[in-house]
Image (cartoon, rainbow, N blue to C red):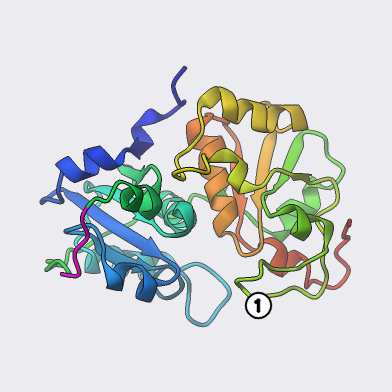
Amino acid sequence: MSYAHPEVLVDTEWVSKNPPSGNLKLVEVDYDPENGYRKGHISGASLIWWKRDINDPITRDIVDKKQFEELMSRNGITPETEVILYGDFNNWFAAFAFWVFKYYGHKNIKIMNGGRKKWELEKKPYTTDEPKISSTNYVAFPPDEGLRAYLFDVKRALDRKEIGLVDVRSAKEFTGEITAPPEYPMEHAQRGGHVPGAQNIPWATAVNDADGTFKTPDELKQNYAPKGITPDKEIICYCRIGERSSHSWFVLKYLLGYPQVRNYDGSWTEWGNMIGNPVEK
């Protein structure tokens, strides 16, 4: 059995044999480009820095349509360009960029399965040379709000059996023992715990430990269905700031083909800091 949308994935071997060209762009998406892209990246890849490039510098939000168009134009991308994304942290941030690209209507976009982890395990080459990019005049579509959940959507989901909430954080974050992973000591919420009724299905259960590639369709189905996260429901994924949940959103929507999946990028840093929001531990 294949994935519902196998066209959204390419493997490392395909990338090594298909270097970027006029209508094919390779983009590395990093949380920490100084220890990623700057130290070495796949030849021809440009950089999208998650914090700087796809998040608004002032508001707690993703970039707006105009900012997205400017980012695409700087990266030499047109609406017809085939874009391959890969990144650090097992493609968390590449998946977040994929979600933003789809939010603004970019059609031909894929993720390199396994990201930097698999490329490095295979000892494939890196370069520190940055590509010369000719800018374009990108015009995006209006936002597809069907891909995004907001605070009021999650509040609406409480006690509604036809909506499944997936908390993709670690077990300790879900129970409230910790409010952020140890590697993010400054990014906490006021309260620990989870949204009432949410199922804890950590993002990492969807990938193979050895190389960060996605598990098989059958393995993925067994990951979600026994916990009531089934394709007949509207599914909302959340984590702490929306990047890990975008990874699970990608799995559910594109690899398993669930028809209604949204990413709640406000996630726990919004829910756990809002006065009056109910919390379970």
Instruction: Tell me residue 112's x, y (percent).
Output: 34, 45
| Depth check, front residue: 54 or 32 | 32
From the top left corner, tell me how far across and down residue 149 is, in percent. 64, 53
Q: Is residue 41 left or right of residue 117?
A: left
**Could one spot residue 51 in this view of the protein?**
yes
Q: Which residue is mark 1?
A: 185
Q: Is residue 128 a member of the stretch shown in magenta? A: yes
**Position of residue 263 measured from the top left corner of the image (x, y, whole percent):** 59, 51
164 vs 113, left or right, is: right
- At x 74% / y 57%, what residue is drawn? 152
What amino acid is found at the position of numbered circle 1 in the picture? Pro
The residue lying at 55 percent from left, 58 percent from top is 243
- Label 1 secondary element: loop
Q: Where is residue 221, by image quadrant?
A: top right
Residue 93 painted magenta: no
Q: What are the residue bounds of the magenta stretch?
A: 125-129
Quadrant of res 78: bottom left
The answer to whether any part of residue 141 appears in the image is no
